[in-house]
C-alpha cells in the first residue's frame, strides 16, 4: 500500500480546507484509514478515521463539530474536510492505512491509535494564521 496526501496549504482563521489521501498498491489490504497530525514539539495526535467497509468513523475531540472525514471507494481516496480552522490546527497532517487483521473488532479497538496502522504517508502541511 502506498499513500499520497495532498491539499495542504496556508489559510486564515475561520477558513475551510480539504486534504486528501490517495491509496494505491495492494489496496485490498487496507481496512481502515486514519488522519493524524503533529505540530512542532508536540506528539502526533489522532484526528479522524474511517473504514472502507461500512464507513464507520470517529473524530478526535479537538476537531469534533469542525472536521469531517469521508471516503470514495471507487477512487480509493479519503478526504478530511476542515472547517472553521484555528491556529492550533496548524500541523503536518499524516494519513495512514491499517489492515487491522481485516477485523471489525480490531479496527474499532485500535483505530484511534498509531500502532493500529501499518502504512503512513509523507504528510501534508496545514498552516492557519490569525
Image (tube, rainbow, N blue to C red):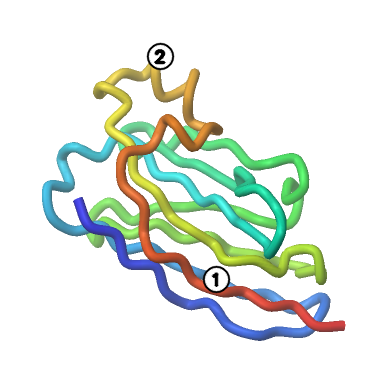
Residue found farthest to the top: 105
| Residue 5 position by quadrant | bottom left
Q: Residue at x 48, y 31 (%)?
A: 111
Residue 66: give x, y in percent of width and height. Answer: 73, 57
| Residue 121 position by quadrant | bottom left
Q: CA distance from mark 1 to mark 2?
A: 29 Å
Q: Earlier in the sequence, mark 1 or mark 2?
A: 1
Q: Are marks 1 and 2 in contact (CB under 8 Å)?
A: no
Mark 1 surroundings: few (<14), some (14-19) or many (≥20) residues within 10 A: some
Residue found farthest to the left: 26
Where's the C terminus, which quadrant?
Answer: bottom right
Label 1 element class: strand
Residue 80: give x, y in percent of width and height. Answer: 53, 60
Residue found farthest to the right: 130
* Image disc number at residue 120: none
Label 2 element class: helix
Residue 42 placement, left or right of 22: right
Q: Which residue is mark 2?
A: 105
Q: Residue at x 27, y 51 (%)?
A: 73
Q: Residue at x 73, y 46 (%)?
A: 64
Numbered circles on residues, count? 2
| Residue 112 position by quadrant | top right
Mark 2 surroundings: few (<14), some (14-19) or many (≥20) residues within 10 A: few
Residue found farthest to the front: 41
Residue 55: give x, y in percent of width and height. Answer: 42, 38
Q: Which residue is mark 1?
A: 18
Residue 70: give x, y in percent of width and height. Answer: 47, 52
Amino acid at each position: 500500500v502506498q499513500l499520497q496526501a495532498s491539499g495542504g496549504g496556508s489559510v486564515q482563521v475561520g477558513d475551510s480546507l480539504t486534504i486528501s489521501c490517495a491509496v494505491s498498491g495492494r489496496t485490498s489490504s487496507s481496512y481502515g484509514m486514519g488522519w493524524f497530525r503533529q505540530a512542532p514539539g508536540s506528539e502526533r495526535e489522532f484526528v479522524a478515521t474511517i473504514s472502507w467497509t461500512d464507513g464507520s468513523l470517529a473524530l478526535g475531540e479537538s476537531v469534533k463539530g469542525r472536521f469531517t472525514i469521508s471516503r470514495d471507494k471507487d477512487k480509493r481516496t479519503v478526504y478530511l474536510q476542515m472547517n472553521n480552522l484555528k491556529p492550533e490546527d496548524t500541523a503536518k497532517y499524516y494519513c495512514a492505512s491499517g489492515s487491522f487483521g481485516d477485523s471489525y473488532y480490531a479496527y474499532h479497538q485500535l483505530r484511534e491509535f498509531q500502532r493500529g496502522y501499518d502504512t503512513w504517508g509523507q504528510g501534508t502541511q496545514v498552516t492557519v494564521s490569525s
